[in-house]
Amino acid sequence: MSRRGRQAEAARNDLRLLRAAHEVFTTQGFDAPVSAIAKRAGLGMGSLYRRYRTKEELLQRLCLIAMERVVEAASAGLAEDDPWEGFAGYVRACVGFGSGALAPVAGTIEVTGEMSRTARQATELAGRLVARAREAGALRADVTELDVSLLIEQFSRPAPGPPDELQDRFKQRLLAVALDGLRAPGATPLPGDPPSLDWYEGRWTPDTS
């Protein structure tokens, strides 16, 4: 096999591993053995360990990919002329690829510099998207970008059991209800203060107590 052929095969295997890891971790829990990932991907343990030396490295890679996709979704939302459609499209896109499905690992893995930089970029773009929708009078004034991020996390959690088309339809139905609840002016005042950035990012700091 040529060098280019080996590189292409390695890229395909990496994609299979990442897809399998995301499915295993989000359906079986983050304490699932990496052997289950290799089995789901149809690859040997050697292939997995050549690419990811530890489970933490694999989780870091998955989190980074999720953050990169959030950046892409927010950029696409900002490119939309209509502020509300751009905002709603961003929320639907993030829920669609489960951007918040890995949130439960917060505080259990080290945050790399690349993860931190990408997360900051995602937060900044989402903030611009939310501010634009608020300024246009489309999004209720008391909703922040972190409220939206936490909402996306809730909708990103997979339903119990194997993937099911009916469950997905129900999720889309409830998401439509939630999006309507975010529209201005908002009938019910939101209780309490909005989440702070320190609290939101602080969840990713390991508890050393």
Image (cartoon, grey):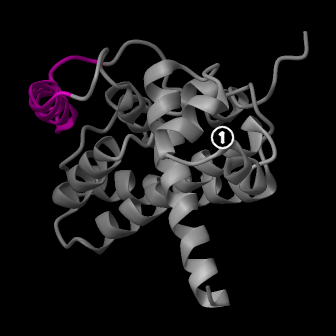
Q: In the rendered view, does 100 fall on the left or right side of 111?
A: left
Instruction: Inspect this view and state whether residue 66 appears.
Output: no
Tell me if residue 66 is in the magenta stretch. Answer: no
Foreground of the two, 132 or 42:
42
Instruction: Tell me: 150 left or right of 137.
Output: right
Give whichever of 76, 61 is nearer the camera.
Answer: 61
Span highlighted in magenta in the image: 164-189
The answer to which of 116 and 52 lies nearer the viewer is: 52
Q: Residue at x 17, y 35 (%)?
A: 185
Instruction: Estimate the x, y position of residue 97 in percent, counting from the top left.
Output: 35, 47
Q: Is residue 182 magenta?
A: yes
Left/right of residue 199 with respect to residue 24 in the rendered view: right
Mark 1 neighbour class, 10 Å CA radius: few under 14, some 14 to 19, many 20 or more: many
Image quarter where the N terminus lies is: bottom right
Q: Which residue is mark 1?
A: 59
Residue 94 vertical placement versus 23 (above, below): below
Horizontally, residue 56 falls left or right of residue 11, namely: right
Any part of residue 188 in sight: yes
